[in-house]
Image (spheres, helix red, strand yellow):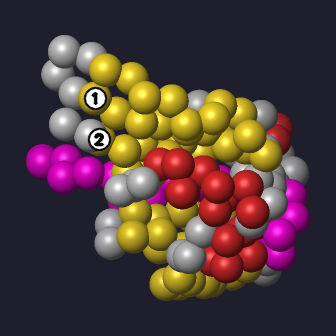
Amino acid sequence: MNITGYHHVGLRVGDMERSLKFYTEGLGGKVIDSFPMAGSGATIYMVELAKGTVVELLPGGTDEAELNARFAHIALSVDDAESAYEQALNAGATSRTAPNKVKRESMTRINAFVFAPAGEIIEFFQVIQ
């Protein structure tokens, strides 16, 4: 088995319309698939933000495991972290951490974090060198 990258990150969202609008209109993603969620009939959306970078938006669940599901953040590789941050804020996100340039031995990067509409954290990650 070879892992070649990540296919998608699944996010449970409470307000599907708001989250779908944020990821499509706000961040420029494209719905590449949608299908009914087993059991509930609610719709699941697969939104491609860039080639090979997909966010799966799942309607909020009711079982305990689904209600308690957590993840740290989604890191999106971008060519301009500052403009991605501003674009997200203009689309309804709130700031967690403003763009910050960090120099390490192996790379220099600019990253910024926002809270998206369902409370998920998105990191915009730009490699400088």
Classify 10 Å Cα crowding around label 2: few (below 14), some (14-19), many (20 and above).
some
Q: Does the magenta stretch include residue 63?
A: no
Let me know if residue 56 appears in the view: yes
> Label 1 is placed on what type of residue?
Thr
- State the SS at label 2: strand
Q: Residues in magenta?
A: 1-18
Q: In which quarter of the image is the C terminus?
A: top left
Q: In this view, does 11 lie to the left or right of 108?
A: right
- The image quadrant that residue 92 belongs to is bottom right
- Point out which mark residue 127 bears: 2
- The image quadrant that residue 103 belongs to is top left
- State the SS at label 1: strand
Q: In this view, does 123 lie to the left or right of 89?
A: left
Question: Residue at label 1?
Answer: 108
Residue 25 at x, y = what percent? Answer: 67, 79
Counting the numbered discs, the total is 2
Q: In this view, does 122 lie to the left or right of 125?
A: right
Name which residue lies at 71% across and 34% down: 96
Let me know if residue 46 appears in the view: no
Name which residue lies at 43% across and 29% down: 101
- Mark 2 or mark 1: name the one nearer the start of the chain: 1
Farthest residue to the left: give it: 1
Q: Are marks 2 and 1 in contact (CB under 8 Å)?
A: yes
